[in-house]
Amino acid sequence: MKNEKTYELVLTALFTAIIVIMAFTPLGYIPLVVINATIIHIPVILGALFLGPKKGAFLGFVFGLTSFINNTFKAATASAFVFSPVLAYNVVGVSGIFKSLYICFVPRILVGVVPYFVYILIRRALKSEQKTARIVVDAAASLILFISVRAFLIRLLPEAVTPLICTLIGLLAGVVLMVVLTVSGSRKGSANIALAYAGLAGAFTNTLFVMSGIFILYKEAYAQAVGVAGEAVLDVIMGVVTFNGIVEAVVAAIIVAGVGYALTRVKPIYEKSEQKNEHVDKMAARA
């Protein structure tokens, strides 16, 4: 029991160090031709899965803290104030302190909580004997891929490809994924699928909560910062969600599934570890 706590403490420190290194170096970003996809949230997602939602929330707080420091002292973009209570105070006054605290920390903390419960939900659904649960999970993955591919292509190639072609390509991608998941579906592969879902959930949690927070709390100030009209802010935000958000979610799904599967060879997912500890405690009580 003591060794387990020590191991978790070391793993928490390791994930914390990785987040800090990624946040303050170019290692936190993957160049993808047209944009850089951030991967700083990935250690937070993995930490939530292998250490539980409480430590995941702590890692999310660390992620938010690095964002606060970067945007306060570097302020590389005109909209950096949305992540910095210090800069926000100069832009919109006292209310900006609380608005930026929310945007900077709450979405990042949730990144350390939501993926864990998504993993548990998907894992249990796939491990159940009911085929309906697996079909629903596979269909959801296919639907997400269809929507993502369609939105990504429309955003990337607005003039070269018509919306109908984008829809057909997205539909084809969704159907192919559904077939692959159905054919290769197995209890052993359910862990990888659940890990991929956790990666998607973590990335989208960060993107959706941050961008919705900006729209609700900073619509006018954000419009002035990026140089667009107030009514165009929603288009800008949807562009970020359907382009950057999708790329980052897909990258997170792939990396979390790959790295997560490798880590399960060394340390079980938090839920299994807890079950093991409960079993040991019961055996000790009986003795």
Image: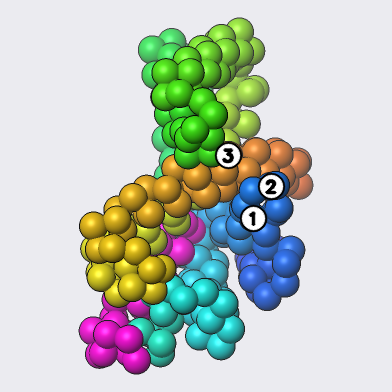
Q: Are marks 2 and 1 in contact (CB under 8 Å)?
A: yes
Q: Do the residues labelled 1 and 3 touch (CB within 8 Å)?
A: no
Q: Name the residue under label 2.
A: 32
Residue 64 as seen in the image, left or right of residue 187: left
Disc 1 element: strand
Residue in the image at 39% along x and 61% along y:
210
Instruction: Indicate the position of residue 179 as horizontal and vertical percent values.
Output: 56, 9
From the image, state whether disc 1 or disc 3 is nearer to you.
Answer: 1
Q: Name the residue under label 1.
A: 36
Q: What residue type is labelled 3?
A: Val
- Using the rendered view, name the quadrant where residue 182 is placed: top right
Judge the density around disc 2: few (<14), some (14-19), many (≥20) Cα neighbours within 10 Å: few
- Ranked by sequence position, the earlier of labels 1 and 3 is 1
Judge the density around disc 3: few (<14), some (14-19), many (≥20) Cα neighbours within 10 Å: many
Instruction: Indicate the position of residue 196 as horizontal and vertical percent values.
Output: 57, 36
Q: Name the residue under label 3.
A: 250
Judge the density around disc 1: few (<14), some (14-19), many (≥20) Cα neighbours within 10 Å: some
Q: Is residue 111 magenta?
A: yes
Residue 155 as seen in the image, left or right of residue 90: right
